[in-house]
Image: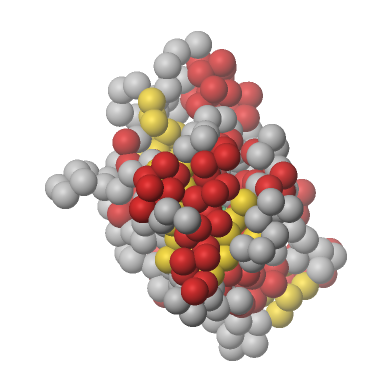
Amino acid sequence: MKTEVLQPTPQALARSAEILSAGGLVAFPTETVYGLGANALNRDAVLSIFAAKGRPADNPLIVHIQDRAQLKDLCEIPELAPDLMAAFWPGPLTILFPKKEIIPSEVTAGLSTVAIRMPSHPLAVAMLRSCGLPIAAPSANRSGRPSPTLAAHVLEDMDGRIPLILDGGPCDVGLESTVLDLCHGQPCILRPGGVTKEMLEAVLGMEVTVAGSVLRPLRPNEKALSPGMRYKHYAPNGSVTLVEGEEADVLSALRRLYQSSASSQERACVLCFSEHMDDLFDCHPHSLGSKSDHAQVAHRLFHILRQLDQEGMERIFSEVLPPEGVGLAVMNRLGRAAGFHTVSAKQVLADHPI
Ligand code: TXA
Ligand code: MG
């Protein structure tokens, strides 16, 4: 199959509507990451998403809508949902709703809830309007790869597997949406994203919990609240080690880890904040963005993870952010990229004396 990459024109939108209505797949930009869309009400179309991504069938999809009126056919509406929709839709918040019959069980992997979001990216909105369908869309990467934040990333993973990519330029947020469960007691963040715990709590006036597996691996026999948490994700080919501690210790520890790796002929690098690029100039530094601008770090992260593979990096040593605000989403993705392998800078300095 030839994969077309089209700039946003009325013709490109008409083509996307034609493909989606016929049960085909279209990759499109959202404000978070690029999605791989199909008609959410067409079982076969939904199955072809799983085939194109190589995605396990038990990992459910998010349904994208552009008009709140679409909800009444798709799901029940929990009591807390309207305030959240008023505050954060359109935007990077996915809410779980009790599903109605019309949603095929393939979309929800057999669960009784369906994840729904209303994206704000103008091209996503235009595409949803022009086809008039609810669109099931996971991130448009091959399963296990970092989510795509550019049309070129989608092409890297999906060339020859899908007919059309709509090119809307770089995604704004750069990390996937916040996934919030309102269906099982206290509101719980299953996946942190651009809409933070603090922002949700301010609107709801109550505490919002965060699923335990957001910042650590699932324990043996622990049930994944969000099936996606079970899978290895976002992992570059090289091994990633996160270094935490006081800033000065972290910088020294990064240098020693880099030097020890480089002296054993491994292709190594450090991921550090832009403020530390000069300090670590001889450690093959890659900038995560400014330590005082967490949104910038979120925006850059997946792009950097893809770049590390292109450069054939084998060992990657990284600084960390405090897990607050958007920092929680960054640390969830970086943590998973590292298999949650974190070391203390003090320990590294003790283990690698000069
Ligand atoms: O920003 C985003 O959310 C992007 C764009 C394209 O909208 N989409 C995205 O989809 O990241 P995906 O499939 O890569 O991630 C969806 C996550 C998975 O972790 C999945 O397990 C979880 O949402 N999920 C979906 N439906 C669920 C449900 N009913 N219950 C629990 N978790 C669910
Ligand atoms: Mg994904």
Q: Is residue 86 above or below residue 136?
A: above
Residue 126: percent from left, percent from top: 75, 53
Residue farthest toward the left in the current orientation of the protein: 221
Residue 264 is left or right of residue 3, and the answer is: left
Q: Is residue 15 above or below residue 85?
A: below
Q: Toward the viewer: 204 or 18? A: 204
Q: Toward the viewer: 28 or 307? A: 307
Question: How did the renderer colour the structure?
Answer: secondary structure
Residue farthest toward the front in the current orientation of the protein: 354
Instruction: Count up the numbered dots.
Output: 0
Residue 269 is left or right of residue 103, and the answer is: right
Q: Residue at x 30, y 28 (%)?
A: 184
Quadrant in which the N terminus appears: bottom right
Q: Toward the viewer: 185 or 314? A: 314
Q: Does any portion of residue 291 appear in the rendered image?
A: yes
Residue farthest toward the top in the current orientation of the protein: 205
Residue 308 is left or right of residue 123, and the answer is: left
Q: Is residue 299 above or below residue 159?
A: above
Residue 21: percent from left, percent from top: 60, 66
Residue 260: percent from left, percent from top: 46, 66
Q: Does any portion of residue 82 appear in the rendered image?
A: no
Q: Residue at x 47, y 59 (%)?
A: 257
Residue 223 is left or right of residue 341, and the answer is: left
Residue 271: percent from left, percent from top: 59, 56
Q: Residue at x 77, y 72 (%)?
A: 6
Residue 207 in which image quadrant: top left
Q: Residue at x 42, y 33 (%)?
A: 189
Q: Toward the viewer: 223 or 272? A: 272
